[in-house]
Amino acid sequence: MQIACIDCTKDSYELLSNTVMPRIREQSITLRNSCVIVVCDLQVKHRKALVVPKLFQRNTVQVHGNQLLFRVGPTVNVIDLRACFDIEDINSFAGFRVDVVVSNFNDLHVGDLAFLSMTIGANNSSGAHSIHCLGKRIQLSGCSSK
């Protein structure tokens, strides 16, 4: 899923930081802290994928009436399943089950190191060998992706 595209290599840090960078950063953090569950009936006739916090307590998931209930720490989260499915022929959600289908999101960034560094807010770090640290090439020799 593409969330942004920069066409011009001359786009400035100020332009990007005032347009796409805050939203990309926020959404990346949200995705890293999330997982995807699928709520479906036993015949898999009706199903819906929902993004929920990764730290939700799986043993607390239950369908009660038309609501999906689960805990994240001390907080009980409630999702109205009628609004999610928007299908009038579902009389009861009692036979629905919940499964985790995506447990972790990974980032894939395409671009040169200068661009990637700039998008995460590390402006003027094009001389580094990694977007995650300022280690020198000799210090990264143990890295599996040489």
Image (cartoon, helix red, strand yellow):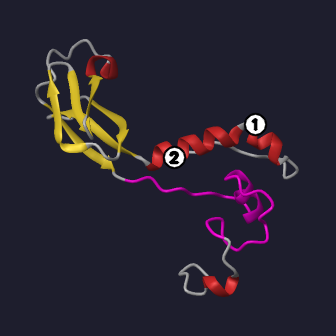
In the image shown, does 9 or 116 lie closer to the viewer? 116
Report which quarter residue 45 is drawn in.
Answer: top left
Horizontal relation, residue 2 to residue 38: left or right: right
- Three-letter residue code for mark 2: Ile
Q: Position of residue 121 (x, y in %)?
A: 70, 52
Q: Quadrant of the C terminus?
A: bottom right
Could you tell me which secondary element the residue under label 1 belongs to? Answer: loop
Q: Please give the name of the residue rendered at 72% of the width and 57% of the height, measured from the top-left corner.
A: 122
| Residue picked out by circle 2 | 29
- Element class at badge 2: helix
Residue 9 locus on image (x, y percent): 84, 52
Residue placed farthest to the right in the image? 10
Give the residue at the far front of this rendering.
74
Q: Earlier in the sequence, mark 2 or mark 1?
A: 1
Residue, x 34% and y 46% (percent of image)? 54
Q: Residues within 10 Å of mark 1 (few under 14, many from 20)?
A: few
On-image quarter of the N terminus: top right
Residue visible at 55% across and 86% down in the picture: 142
Residue identified by numbered label 1: 18
Q: Position of residue 31 (x, y in %)?
A: 47, 45
